[in-house]
Structures are given as C-alpha cells and as structure tokens.
Amino acid sequence: MSVRACLPYADRRLHTPAAPVAEITETVRMIWDDMIETMEAMPGLGLAAPQIGIMLRLAVVDASEKRGQAVRMANPEVLHASVQLRMHDEASPNLPGVSAPVERPRAVTVRFLNDTGAVEDRDFVGLWAVSVQHQIDHLNGTLFVDHLSPLRRKMLVAKSAKLSRG
C-alpha cells in the first residue's frame, strides 16, 4: 500500500466522468488499498479514484469515529435520496486549504459492487451519506465547489491556488 498524490483542481481528469469497473480484480483491490491509505493520510472521510488520477468508478468512504471501517465501492449509484437535507462543510484534497457548506440529502440508498464483487444496496445516513454523495460527484467529474454559485466557486479556487503557491 502507498499514499498517492492528489491531482490539482485544474487537472482535466477531475472534471471528467470516470469509466465503469467491469469486475473486481486484484488490481482493483490494490487501488482501493492505496486509496484508503491516502484517505487516512489526509485525513479524510472518503476518496474517489479520479482524485488520484485513476479514471475508474472506485470510491472508499470511512465516516466512522474509530476509523478502520472503510466501505469499498465500485460503480456506486444513488437509488434513493431522502427529501430531508443536511448542510455540511465540505473540502477536497484537490482544492487544499478551502471548504464550503454544501446541502445534500441527509440519507441515501446506494447500489455498488463491493470488495467481493457482489452487488450491494446499502443505506448511508448523516456524515456517511454526505461523504458517499461527495465521492459519487467526483466519479461524475463534479467537485463540491460545483454546487456553489459561480462567484463563490471562483473565489475558493483562486484562494486554494494562492495557498498552494505559498
């Protein structure tokens, strides 16, 4: 396992939908291991493969208090979202140093291929739901700032770029 570098916001891959995963292979499992290692090093609540330059629909999420409960997902899709919304401050290693509140459904039911290759439907609530939706956005080429007004997005991208330059 190794910690992978996260792409900068300007990289086109972050703004491009990722390709579906045909099957769960040893290579996919190794990518998930690296993603978890990278997520823990940030530390973060989730990571999508495009964030580290791998254009596959792979994500990991761990919103547990104790950690070590990462859910590995391939091809995740939201089947159902609650009408009740939740505001949460979101951030991304692809835009270091900035965050913004984003409103999302409080609970979602997600279908994905799990680490055994089986189709799984799972309910996520609260912080877990926020993180899963955030990762699915990444798989679709969307970042949290895309949920903001154009002016707010431009300001945060500029601030992150300035912070990255030092």
Image (cartoon, grey):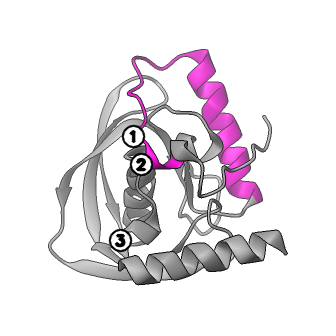
Residue 143 in the image: state x and y as whole percent.
Answer: 45, 61
For the point 36% across and 25% down, the residue is 118
Q: In the rendered image, is residue 101 in sight?
A: no
Quick one: SS at disc 1? loop
Disc 2 marks which amino acid? Gly
Disc 3 marks which amino acid? His
State left or right for residue 59 relative to residue 68. left
Q: Which residue is mark 3?
A: 147
Q: Which residue is most to the right?
A: 166
Query: Is mark 1 in CB contact (under 8 Å) with mark 2?
Result: yes
Residue 40 in the image: state x and y as whole percent.
Answer: 71, 56
N-terminal-most mark, 1 or 2: 1
Quadrant in which the C terminus is drawn: bottom right
User: Which quadrant would residue 147 be assigned to in this image?
Assistant: bottom left
**Marks 1 and 3, how far apart at CA:** 16 Å
Residue 74 in the image: state x and y as whole percent.
Answer: 42, 34
Q: Is residue 37 magenta-colored?
A: yes
User: Which quadrant would residue 33 be assigned to in this image?
Assistant: top right
Q: Is residue 82 magenta-colored?
A: no
For the point 62% across and 59% down, the residue is 94
Local crowd size for mark 2, using a 10 Å CA cut-off: few (<14), some (14–19), many (≥20): some
Q: Which residues are magenta?
A: 14-41
Q: Main secondary structure of the magenta part?
A: helix
Disc 1 marks which amino acid? Pro
**Marks 1 and 2, how far apart at CA:** 5 Å
Looking at the image, is 119 positioned above or below residue 130? above
Q: Which residue is mark 2?
A: 141
Q: Which residue is mark 1?
A: 17
Quadrant in which the N terminus is drawn: top right
Looking at the image, is 135 positioned above or below residue 151? above
Quick one: SS at disc 3? helix
